[in-house]
Image (cartoon, helix red, strand yellow):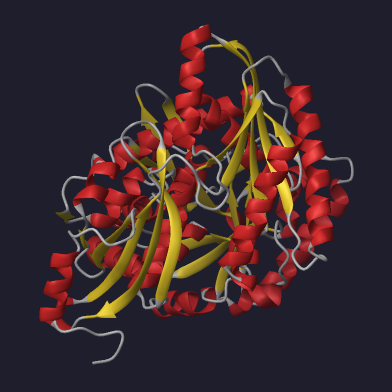
Amino acid sequence: MNDNSLNKKSFENSEFKANVRTAGADDFVFLYNLDTDVISLSDEVVQVLNLPSNKFNNAFNTLSSICHPEDSELFAKAIARLKTGGMGDFIAEYRFENGKEFYVPVTIRGRVLSIGASGNILTGMITLKSNQRDDITGLPLESQMVADYDDLLADNGALTGFILALRIEGLERINESFGLDVGDKVFNLVAQACQTVRDEDTLVYRISGNKIALMNVNGLNARDAQMLYSSLKQKVAEIEYNLDYAVVFTISAGLVAFVNDSSKLKELLKKADFSLSMGKKSGKNNLYLFNSIEYTKHINKIHIREKLRESVKNDFKGFEMFYQPVVDASKVTSNSEKIEGVRVIGAEALLRWSCPELGMLGADQIVPILEESGLIAPVGRWILIKTFTQCKMWNEYDKRFHMSVNLSYMQFERSDILMDVQMALEKSKVNPENIILEITESGYIDHVELQRILDEFHNMKIRVDIDDFGTGYSNLRYIQNLHANTLKLDYTFVHKAVEDRDGESERKVIEYIINMAHDLGMNVCLEGVESENDVAVLAPLKADKYQGYLFGKPVSSYAFIDANRKFLKDE
């Protein structure tokens, strides 16, 4: 028997031991069947994390639901890699909610074992940091911070001060390059620096997510916190010098200051953590002061995400596809007053979502949230089936009518897009030659796997269009290698060509792209055509397709068929 295999009897014995506490004060054996998604845990772990039982199904979703939002993506990626054999030995720390409004740091150490018919099992130790002080730094933990704050709030009714959340940027790289011992040393040195620069009324804690928080509730303000942060950066420079620059790192900070505030600490920590994340986006090694306007946007985004999640669970209630006409540009003429020769040859499908509370939201508002949350995978499958089926119905009017469907980059990352498309084809019975899948140039152009996937689409007889062409950095020859059928020029090109004073130069660029695309056997669609004058200006450029409000805004399937029935006929 090798190190990575066990027989069924050994597994059963190990499963029995999963309910036995090990010699370590906070260490517990666990077993997680990666194939059946069943986990076995000790009673102590179940109690601390408020789990349903010491053995339960649907383990991944259950644990994901209590995983800290910042850790959930890393947790999902780790489990995915484990399931595909991408890891052997495994060690990671995540934060899981304990059902009492704060998160417990949990260290998971294990190894994947192959157990024959029982499947692949991740087994090892779960360490609960349930005491009130951190083993590495000696700092009190977040649970103690909550207790301290609550006591002060109860005594005073309202508090004035600040919370400064700190993160060591580069710590993960240090752990990977030099080992956890070196990373722990750096973390401990930073914790000591925090203790050195603080005043006696400012308390220091280690909080979840490998962060440090400095809390003052005795009247200091944002300026005091900024000075404290500056002093800390000087200490970091000293640490690097004393270590002979063997390791290099920086400190990012998020600050929330408050005056006569009676908020719960949980809310203040959320604001500090939000500020810390915003600071990282704007550039590491700096301090970001809490911005209530940006935070409101953030909270609204979270609210929309949860509403979207509910809609997906409720059979995609609230989701709807709108359709915008695509016309044959070669037949359209205009004298700037009247347009003639309009022939609708297809439609672009555009996602909409609505709920009573928020009304209707467009794709630009919801797709980024769907992508970040991972909901783009199930919604993307729904879109494919819905639009392919709609195309099949409209092909009863016009057998050549095509449907253009946008693909998100994250559909390539988070789902088997080839299987999703194949399933939609089979369910809808649509002619694949009537389907066009649109991808955005800037989102995919360096994606190595893209070539293979697009080759498969080509073999399926599905066409591919490059949307928003001109916003990325590729050349036409590379686009041709991707089997692109049509280049859709971003509407900003069209607007500049027909409206700007230097529109002549823009028109020359468009004409050049069109000629090159035609030489390479590709078509060009001009988006954003809004008036008869636009057509008069653009007609000499010889584009193949037009799309824009002049020919129709995105509307429901019923409104689309009513507006375009006279064009939807087989000729």
**Residue 156, how many percent across, how many down?**
53, 8
Q: Using the image as rendered, state which of residue 2 and residue 52 is in the foreground.
A: 2
- Quarter of the image with the C terminus is bottom left
Which residue occupies the extreme bottom position in the image?
1
Task: Name the residue: 43% across, 29% down.
Answer: 360
| Quarter occupied by residue 427 | bottom left
Residue drawn at 19 percent across, 50 percent down: 43
Q: In percent of the image, x 36 and y 33: which residue is there?
A: 307
Looking at the image, which is closer to me, 526 or 421? 421
User: Does residue 435 show up?
Assistant: no
- In the image shown, does 393 or 464 lie closer to the viewer? 464
Spot occupied by residue 53 in the image (x, y as percentages of width and height): 16, 48
Residue in the foreground of this view, choosing between 48 and 331 = 48
Which quadrant of the figure has residue 261? top right
The image shows residue 190, relative to residue 143, as above or below, that is below
Taking the spot 24% from the left edge, 39% from the top edge, the residue there is: 314
Q: Where residue 389 sits: x, y (%)?
A: 28, 55
Quarter in which the N terminus is drawn: bottom left
Q: Is residue 323 above or below residue 481?
A: above
In the image: residue 236, left or right of residue 390: right
Would residue 197 appear left or right of 394 to someone viewing this image? right
Q: Is residue 30 visible?
A: yes
- Measured from the top left, where is residue 348 in percent x and y? 47, 50
